[in-house]
Image (spheres, helix red, strand yellow):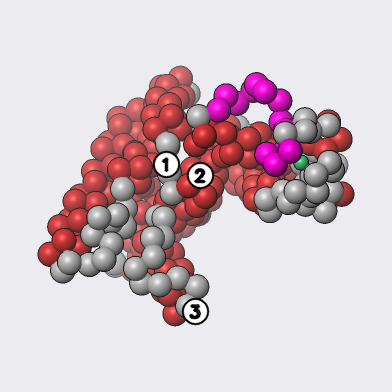
């Protein structure tokens, strides 16, 4: 019985992931989400219902359009699979209570932001602003600590904003080749605001600490392995998203551990 529940949650996650794929493709292009129906981006053939089954269709079609054999991005199956796993993780962490749905929304927003940032180097206002507002309203309606969320928004966005300004000054001073792009942008500031709303001020700090840790480890690995150059632009949004996710699932443990470490 429990296995069936897990499977059901995974399938719901994968189905929503399939919808987020549409968001990731269409939002940066300014297209509507519901109309027109799904179609192949290469030949425009409408996608038949059986070709729209999360994960399975991609495998059955071997990642190709059934009409023109154009390649379907591996991101489709990846996002569906990740969402299935994430929803399962949230269920194991929270059960089916209010927190499950609260963080399910947050994590879904993180998935959309991560992949638009990876593909387009964009964190869209039309994703971040509504998410902040929905988070605050949900916080109020579920009688969570609204002050904590507002403080989280200010602390999260404030810290990243400071980093953006300071790094821009330093890059300019040393005349670094990235001085015009910078490492982080205003999109990251707004993302940090969303994180603050959902995590509160204490845990948004845990999330940012974890993000920087992942960012430096992965960034270092990418540069050492020669996959990226020191001057290549590496979007920071995905690291903020991973830090947030780790905090949603294990934030209290990390905080306890950190407090102990400080004695
Ligand atoms: Zn096609």
Which residue is rendered at x = 80% and y = 44% of the image? 68
Q: Is residue 241 visible?
A: no
* Residues marked 1 and 2 touching at CB (< 8 Å): yes
90 left or right of 153 in image: right
Which residue is rendered at x = 40% and y = 25% of the image? 133
Which label was assigned to residue 123?
1
- Residue 90 position within the rendered picture, expressed as x and y whole percent measured from the top left: 61, 44
Q: How many marks?
A: 3
Q: Which part of the image, by quadrant, shows the C terminus?
A: bottom left
Which label was assigned to residue 225?
3
Looking at the rendered structure, the secondary structure element under dot 2 is helix
Ligand 1: quadrant of the figure: top right
Q: Is residue 36 magenta?
A: yes
From this view, report whether residue 167 is shown above or below residue 151: below
**Residue at mark 2:** 116
- Residue 47 position within the rendered picture, expressed as x and y whole percent measured from the top left: 79, 33
Quadrant for residue 134, please give it.
top left
* Residues marked 2 and 3 touching at CB (< 8 Å): no
Label 1 vs 2, first from the N-terminus: 2
- Residue 174 position within the rendered picture, expressed as x and y whole percent measured from the top left: 15, 69
From this view, report whether residue 46 is shown above or below residue 192: above
Q: Badge 1: few (under 14), some or many (20 or more) residues near its Cα, within 10 Å?
A: many
Q: Badge 3: few (under 14), some or many (20 or more) residues near its Cα, within 10 Å?
A: few
Looking at the rendered structure, the secondary structure element under dot 1 is loop
């Amino acid at each position: 019985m429990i296995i069936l529940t897990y499977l059901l949650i995974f399938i719901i996650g994968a189905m929503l992931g399939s919808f987020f794929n549409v968001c990731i493709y269409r939002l940066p292009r300014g297209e509507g989400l519901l109309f027109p129906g799904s179609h192949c981006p290469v030949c425009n053939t409408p996608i038949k219902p059986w070709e729209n089954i999360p994960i399975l269709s991609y495998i059955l079609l071997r990642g190709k359009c059934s009409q023109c054999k154009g390649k379907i991005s591996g991101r489709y199956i990846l996002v569906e699979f990740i969402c299935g796993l994430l929803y399962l993780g949230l269920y194991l962490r929270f059960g089916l209570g209010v927190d499950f749905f609260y963080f399910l929304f947050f994590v879904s927003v993180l998935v959309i932001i991560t992949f638009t940032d990876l593909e387009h180097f964009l964190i869209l206002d039309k994703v971040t602003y509504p998410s902040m507002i929905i988070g605050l309203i949900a916080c109020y309606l579920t009688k969570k600590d609204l002050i904590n969320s507002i403080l989280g928004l200010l602390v999260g966005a404030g810290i990243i904003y400071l980093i953006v300004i300071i790094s821009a000054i330093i890059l300019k001073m040393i005349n670094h080749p990235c001085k015009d792009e910078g490492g982080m942008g205003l999109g990251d500031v707004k993302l940090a605001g969303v994180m603050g709303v959902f995590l509160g001020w204490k845990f948004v700090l845990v999330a940012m600490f974890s993000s920087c840790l992942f960012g430096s480890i992965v960034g270092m690995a990418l540069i050492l392995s020669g996959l990226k150059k020191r001057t290549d632009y590496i979007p920071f949004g995905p690291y903020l998203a991973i830090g947030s996710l780790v905090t949603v699932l294990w934030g209290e443990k990390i905080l306890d551990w950190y407090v102990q470490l400080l004695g």
